[in-house]
Image (cartoon, rainbow, N blue to C red):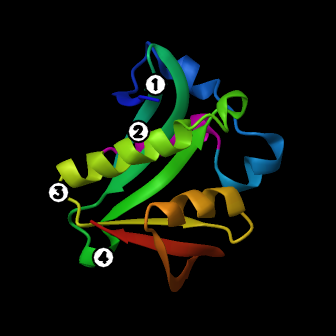
Amino acid sequence: MAVVLRNISEENRGEIIALKVAENQEEYIASNEASLNEAAYNPGVARAFGIYSGERAVGFTMFAFDEENDDPHDRFWLWRFMIDESLQGQGLGRAALTEIIKYFRENGADEITLSTKESNRNALALYHSFGFEENGDMNDGENILKLKL
């Protein structure tokens, strides 16, 4: 299943905000609206995208590209990643993560960092299948995972 990352504008902001995770997943990720507000306060670092399959918005992702961070292992983060609850289990997450990793590579990242709770088993299984590995560190009670590119 092919997906693409699209910039978020006033034209598609509403459809991205309307995407939701399942109720039992809400503890794992901020709402898309909160994430977009956070991106607005971090314009030099945050990069937010809608995930699209054809013309349909199916998910949301947000990255941190903090190339001025003194720690080279803490410059490139996958901050948010979600697929709408009605579309999960169809391979869209796997297709989107492939595009996300491609974006990081094409934009100069040599490593991707993310964090999630240990109880977020479905997400961890997906991340592990792509080669992300826990490094033993924590971020606000979440396990940090890294992928070397």
Please, what is the dominant secondary structure of the magenta stretch? Answer: helix
Q: Which of the two discs, 4 and 1, sits closer to the camera?
A: 1
Image point (66%, 75%), residue name: 141
Residue on which disc 4 sits: 73
Residues at marks 3 and 2, CA–CA distance in whole angstroms = 17 Å
Residue 9 occupies quadrant: top left
Residue on which disc 2 sits: 48
Decide if residue 140 is in sight here: no
The amino acid type found where label 1 is placed reads: Tyr
Residue on which disc 1 sits: 52
Element type where label 1 sits in the image: strand
| Sequence-first disc among 4 and 1 | 1
| Sequence-first disc among 3 and 4 | 4
The amino acid type found where label 2 is placed reads: Ala
Disc 4: CA contacts within 10 A as few (<14), some (14-19) or many (>=20)? some
Q: Is residue 111 above or below residue 9?
A: below
Residues at marks 1 and 2, CA–CA distance in whole angstroms = 13 Å
Residue 143 appears left or right of 49: right
Residues at marks 1 and 3, CA–CA distance in whole angstroms = 23 Å
